[in-house]
Image: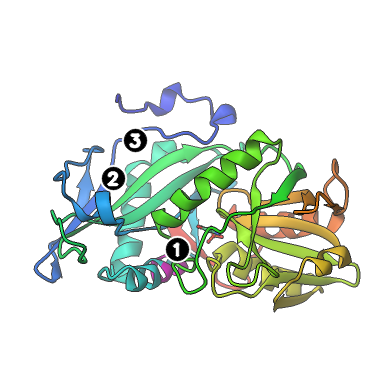
Amino acid sequence: MAKAKASELDWNKLGFGYRDLPYSWQEEYYDGEWLGGGLTSESNLVLNEAAQVLHYGQEVFEGLKAYRTKDGKVQLFRPEENAKRLNDSADRLMMPHYPVDKFLAAVKAVVKANEDFVPPYGTGGTLYLRPYMIGTQPLVGVTPSEHFVFRVYATPVGAYVKGLTPMPYVLSKYDRAAPAGTGRAKTSGNYAASLLPEMEAKKAGYADALYLDPKEHKYVDEFSGANFFGVTKDGQFVTPKSDSILPSITKRSLLQVAEDLGLNPVEKRLTLADLDDLAEAGAMGTAAVISPVGSLTDWDGKKHVFYSETEVGPVTTKLYNALFAVQVGDAEDKHGWVVPVD
Ligand SMILES: *Cc1c(COP(=O)(O)O)cnc(C)c1O
């Protein structure tokens, strides 16, 4: 695959595809220690055919973005939270930690080395960063790998969806995670499990499937790659509390933003009946910040319509604008979330 050229990109039509950029970061782990990392222009990996990750799935990953500000600078949003979460995921998958300071240095180095690919302010585009770690030891028996590779690649992406457009969602009959499984870890296996439910939902005309808690199928969990929130008629910002969902950094940030905006932030178990109290609903994650949920069709075919199937609600709009303004440097960073790349 040929390397991308920044001069050939149309910043307003980036989409969400992979582009092969000049530099990635790589560090290998061997005999209990990290061997020293650095930038590499090689974007292909050579793995033994028996590498642990290919058969037994030892993989953890992160997703974050570099944002171009109005004055042309580049900044990250809460990257140390990604570093810590990578290590939490690694614990569950029996993988080594990648030290937080090294994670931050790696991410910054990749942004700087590919700075021409950070889209201009105002285009809605960002430089998406994908840190990840895989088990590379050749193994036949099912055991944790003792060799690992940590890498970070970058690719420019457009606004996930242009503007805030409500979409129809459907309640999934599948589970994405098990009750005491890997739902809290950001690991590829959860995504493999969500492919069929997501594609079936899309074929049926929905944007994605919403999962219930895998133990009782009574409480709302989350989407395949985003957490769920609702705004109640009496001004609560509610989001599910569950042991099988991925702790979204966007969720944690919006809980704070909601409080700043005078809403009452609440994390609690949310039943399907509770959905009828919601005036607005949305999906939240790094990719889109917020995707408004226009409607949710449940197992009985009952359609819960939130604010409107075609128009985004006022609170969702306020939450989105407030958080995105901090991410691109238009609003004051009251909570110390922004990290400049200099
Ligand atoms: C990454 C992810 C999210 C969103 O997390 P952010 O930190 O907000 O990007 C939500 N759910 C799942 C399953 C995820 O993998």
Q: Distance from label 2 to label 1 (Cα)? A: 17 Å
Q: Secondary structure at mark 2?
A: strand
Q: Is residue 71 visible?
A: no
Residue 42: where, in percent of width, then height?
21, 38
Residue 136: where, in percent of width, then height?
18, 54
The kind of residue on which mark 2 rests is Ser
Q: Is residue 9 above or below residue 75?
A: above
The kind of residue on which mark 1 rests is Pro
Residue 288: where, in percent of width, then height?
62, 48
Rendered residue at 72%/63% (across/down): 229
Q: Which residue is mark 3?
A: 21
Q: Is residue 249 above or below residue 283?
A: below
Residue 82: where, in percent of width, then height?
44, 64
Q: Which residue is mark 2?
A: 24
Which contiguous range is marked in magenta? 81-85
Q: Nearer the viewer, residue 113 or 296?
A: 296
Q: Which residue is mark 1?
A: 79
Are discs 3 and 2 less than 8 Å apart at CB? Answer: yes
Q: Earlier in the sequence, mark 2 or mark 1?
A: 2
Near mark 1 (Cα within 10 A), the count class, few <14, some 14-19 or many ≥20, is many
Label tally? 3
The kind of residue on which mark 3 rests is Leu
In the visual, does 229 lie left or right of 157?
A: right
Tell which residue pokes out farthest to the top in this image: 8
Determine which quarter of the picture holds residue 285. bottom right
Are discs 2 and 1 less than 8 Å apart at CB? Answer: no
Near mark 3 (Cα within 10 A), the count class, few <14, some 14-19 or many ≥20, is many
In the visual, does 46 lie left or right of 283?
A: left
Rendered residue at 34%/33% (across/down): 20
* Model colouring: rainbow
